[in-house]
Image (cartoon, rainbow, N blue to C red):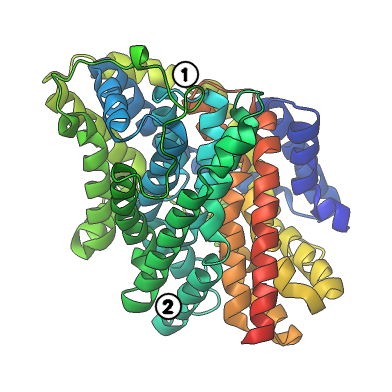
Amino acid sequence: MILIALSAVILPLILLGILNMPATKGMSISATIVLLEGYFFWKMPSKVLLASILQSVHKALPILWILFGALMMLNILQHTGAIDRINSGFHQISADMRLQLILVAFLFGGLIEGVSGFGTPAMVTAPLMIALGYSPMAAVTLSLVADSTPASFGAVGTPLTVGLSNVSDKSDFLNNIGQRITQLDLFSGTFMPLLLVFMLIFLFGKNDEKKSKDFLALVPWTLFIGLVYSLFALIVSFLISYEFVAILAPFFTIIVAIISIKINFLLPKKILQEPWTTSTKDIKSDHSMSLLTAWSPYIVVILLLLATRTIMPLKNFLTQNINLSWNNILGFKQINSDWEFLYSPGTLLTIAAIIGLLLQVKSLKSFLPTAKKVAFSMKSTAIALIVTLIMVQIFTNSELNQSNIPSMPMYIAQVISKYLSSVWIVIAPFLGQLGSFVTGSTTVSTLTFGQIQADIATKAGVGTDLVLAAQLIGAAAGNMICVHNIVSVSSVVGLTGQEGNILRKTAVPALIYGLVVGIVGFIFTLVI
């Protein structure tokens, strides 16, 4: 039975990661097999399976709406020429693509994660990176890997607030977990900028003998930026609240990073040439549009996201009006799908795109033609996303069965813990990754496994706060390998069908990150 329960993990790895099938085909096969297994082995009633399919279709809609908003933003910035102005603005800070990678993917993406979450950061940063000269494959891979460390606290702390709601909703408990996450990340998250630069150079750089030298030259600065980020996160978690870690930490670190670049602190004396510097002849010099105007749609997005998540009367209004959620699907109170339309990042991205048009070209003539083009470009993505979610929802809804056995994810956790409870702190982050890989969400992974992680920690005599922190960090790292995140971001940059290739590239850093967190957690158990 354990192999059947694990099929939702094993099948995508084989079909996408090894056989290199496109997501539309590979995930269709995976969903079909998991559906049949749910019916014949888990004894899920036909009505539950149908409700899960309907839930999947509905859950795909808000994700596709976010994707639509991200694509609208990209297309409109290209139409107005703002993307070229943003490009030249980054080159005024530094033409070194290694530094731009940290500024855009890790820090700007981290800020987007802090106020939005739900896969939005990589969909926003990957197109920006392509405009800066990165290949589409590099942009997608590095954006996904970067959207990991901040995701523990994404969307104003949702992974803790909602993800741990099955364990406890007391603010002191949640703040304690948040503090423990930042303590672990001092020894793991600090290395994320270093890992990103390593991947850029050794996976996507030219095949020459200078790779090691190019990497080692930037080790001091990347470690400095990683440590600054981790220290800011630690300070915010202890002095303010876990809810603002992924907003304030990247914001202040961006300032420190720009200053350090300007004064050449811990940086090599000369800027390297290709592939770390895009050719100056490719950089447009038309500065008729101000940098502030060019960035205005992104500024609007961040302000809207921040306001709608922190101003409670506004949040209540947006969540209670035009609520397209579907609850109690086919009469099952456990099967629901949320879509608060006005509160959705997709709506806010679309509004920001409209404002960008008005500010940059003072006309909305191109909006409808662009929207039509974007909508038609999303057809294959919609198919891949829906079949992926069908597999996910059958997997998570499998507790509704006639065999009186736990759901597939709980069955996996119970079997693993039976044999590995003595070293559970090392295993905990990987269970978090497993949850995110299948469900596509740090929050849902923690909601699924949070209680069993706490129970195992108690039985194993390990601190519950430490194990739950490892769960959340692992679930955040799972964003790197989450199939529907990969499908969505690939669509934004035109890499539909390359999902398996991307998964192979992100799997290794995800596993390394999980291992580092596990080892650091084990050391913590020895000293605290």
Q: How many other residues sit within 10 Å of disc 1, few (<14), some (14-19) or many (≥20)?
A: some
Secondary-structure class at tag 1: helix
Q: Which of 68 and 46 is in front in this view?
A: 68
Q: Which residue is drawn at 35% across and 46% down?
A: 344
Q: Quadrant of residue 18?
A: top right
Q: Which of marks 2 and 1 is nearer the N terminus?
A: 2
Separation of marks 2 and 1 at Cα, in angstroms: 43 Å
Q: Nearer the viewer, residue 331 or 132?
A: 132
Where does the C terminus fall, quadrant-wise? bottom right
- Left or right of 524 on screen, residue 87: left
Q: How many other residues sit within 10 Å of disc 2, few (<14), some (14-19) or many (≥20)?
A: some
Give the foreground label among 2 and 1. 2
Q: Nearer the viewer, residue 67 or 287?
A: 287
Q: Which residue is drawn at 59% across and 37% down?
A: 213
Q: Which residue is drawn at 36% across and 13% down?
A: 282
Circles 2, 1 touching at the beta carbon (< 8 Å): no
* Farthest residue, direction left: 362
- Residue that numbered label 2 is attached to: 175
- Left or right of 501 on screen, residue 95: left
Indicate the position of residue 324 as horizontal and vertical percent values: 37, 46
Indicate the position of residue 367 as horizontal and vertical percent values: 25, 19
**Residue 440 visible at all:** no
Labels in figure, total: 2
Q: Which residue is drawn at 21% across and 29% down?
A: 294
Report the disc number at residue 377.
1
Indicate the position of residue 331 as horizontal and vertical percent values: 56, 57
Question: In the rendered image of this protein, does residue 81 appear above or below residue 62?
Answer: above
- Left or right of 465 on screen, residue 522: right
Q: Give the residue type at disc 1.
A: Ser
- Left or right of 326 on screen, residue 472: right
Indicate the position of residue 148 as horizontal and vertical percent values: 53, 52
